[in-house]
Amino acid sequence: MTTHAVAARRLRKDHGGTRAVDGVDLLITPGEVVALLGPNGAGKSTLIEMITGLTRPDTGEITVFGDAPVAAVRSGAVGVMLQEAGLLDDVTVQEAVAMIASLHRAPLPVEEALRRAGLTDLAARRSARLSGGEKQRVRFAMALVPGPDLLILDEPTSAMDVAARRDFWRSMRDFGAAGRTVLFATHYLEEAEQHADRVVFMRDGAVVADGPVSVVLARVSGRTVRAAVPDARLDELRALPGVAGVELRGGRAELRSADADAVVRELLARFPGTHDIEVIGAGLDEAFIRLTEEEAAS
């Protein structure tokens, strides 16, 4: 287990009679960027709490770089950015980051942590005067300042605007380029698709899919055909061979199928006026819906 950034085996955790995490196995190799996905109540936050030592599993084993999670956090090997972590209203941004730096033997310079988080111009501002997105960036700087080998982020870009999210991921790419490990939970599926080496889907406390983005998408094989189909009725489109689902709005159809080529041929044969045809592969948003639906039905 010592060769992994995170090694979790058969983790279980109950909260008030509810099984929050149910038999999770998870191995993360140093240098990986892993996205943790799942609906609300899937167990993502509880799993993160166990990896960071904030709570202990009821059963199972977990190590972080071969140590107990609490020991790994205390040593500065782990930086944690929690979505709901509070900030002291009367403390400036620089003071907040400096306080965290003072707890570690070999922290990053505070100025460097502020620069990486895009907070240099806000260093003297008190927390009470920060927006929600700015507070997220302060939490990011506080997670960076130990100089961790593993960075754990819970919904890191919530409350950030588009520009702030772009800057955040630019900084994350710089962090990961040094061979460090990142585990992040997110509801922005496009972030996982763009920035993760690997995705882990959870539902009802269990892992339902785990692997590189391309492998997970292969589990939900199929494509979507979008086209303008004048005068077509919904029942006519549903009757086309190989069509698994149809939406029709304002003369524009969206058809899901495992054989997009056959659907396109049928569309053109039966509706010669069909035009503006697009064929789109499944993305993580569709994978998320279909994988969680499969698990709920099983």
Image (cartoon, grey):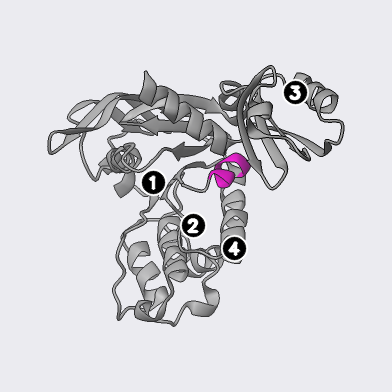
Magenta span contains residue 191: yes
Side of 192 relative to 257 (left or right): left
Quote the CA–CA distance across marks 3 and 1.
50 Å
Side of 247 relative to 140 (left or right): right
Q: Residue at x 73, y 23 (%)?
A: 260
Q: Which residue is mark 4?
A: 162
Quote the CA–CA distance across marks 1 and 4.
27 Å
Q: Which residue is mark 2?
A: 157
Residue 288: x and y in percent read 50, 34
Q: Which residue is mark 1?
A: 78
Side of 131 relative to 12 (left or right): right
- Which of the two residues, 246 or 167, is positioned nearer the viewer here? 246
User: CB atoms at circles 2 and 1 under 8 Å apart?
Assistant: no
Q: Residue furthest right?
A: 272
Which residues are drawn in magenta? 189-194
Q: Residue at x 17, y 30 (%)?
A: 58
Is residue 3 in view from this perspective? no
Of pointers 4 and 3, the one earlier in the residue sequence: 4
Would you place residue 158 above or below residue 225 in this image?
below
Q: Residues within 10 Å of mark 4 (few under 14, many from 20)?
A: few
Is residue 197 in view from this perspective? yes
Q: Which residue is mark 3?
A: 263
Q: Amino acid at mark 4?
A: Val
Of pointers 3 and 2, the one earlier in the residue sequence: 2
Of pointers 2 and 1, the one earlier in the residue sequence: 1
The secondary element bearing badge 3 is classed as helix
Quote the CA–CA distance across marks 2 and 4.
9 Å
Residue 106: x and y in percent read 41, 56
Q: Amino acid at mark 2?
A: Thr
Which mark is nearer the camera, 3 or 1?
3
